[in-house]
Image (cartoon, rainbow, N blue to C red):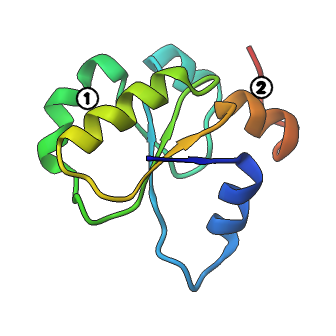
Amino acid sequence: MKNLSVAELSQWLADTQRERPLLLDVREAWEFALCRIEGSEPVPLGALGGFLSSIDPERPIVCICHHGTRSLHAGLALERHGCREIYNLVGGVDAWARQIDRSMATY
């Protein structure tokens, strides 16, 4: 697993020549409802085990949470499942809201 800054993710998402990653948001449903990175898929960390069989292990995956701790745990679980290209979004949606999309709600 690699760390990914919000600036790096923003550049990646803007690059149409690069494969779009699965944006896996592992926060709780109420958090996801409050704010999210566009295109992210909500799978609370506690429900990740039931979601693993539907994940393509060859697709790049960016794990997202509030600050980066839960997403780190999700990334470790994905590694154990055999996923090969996993990124932990450092600073999570909080950093995204403060550095990339200042219109996004923070909590």
Q: Is residue 105 left or right of residue 42?
A: right
Q: Of 57 and 27, which appears nearest the observer?
A: 57
What is the secondary structure assignment of the residue under circle 2? loop
Q: Is residue 36 left or right of residue 23?
A: right
Amino acid at dot 1? Leu
Residue plotted at (65% across, 36% down) = 90
Amino acid at dot 2? Ala
Q: Is residue 68 left or right of residue 93?
A: left
What is the secondary structure assignment of the residue under circle 1? helix
Q: Of 38 and 7, which appears nearest the observer?
A: 7
Please give the residue where the numbered disc 1 appears in the rendered image.
48
**Inter-mark Cα distance, 2 to 1:** 25 Å
Please give the residue where the numbered disc 2 appears in the rendered image.
105
Residue 10, placed above or below residue 25: below
Residue 87, placed above or below residue 48: below
Residue plotted at (63% across, 22% down) = 34
Whole-percent x, y for residue 107 in the image: 73, 13
Q: Quadrant of residue 50?
A: top left
Whole-percent x, y for residue 52 in the image: 18, 40
Task: Give the label on residue 83, or none.
Answer: none
Whole-percent x, y for residue 12 in the image: 64, 67
Whole-percent x, y for residue 103 in the image: 85, 37
Nearer the observer, disc 2 or disc 1? 1
Residue plotted at (63% across, 65% down) = 13
Total numbered labels placed on residues in the image: 2
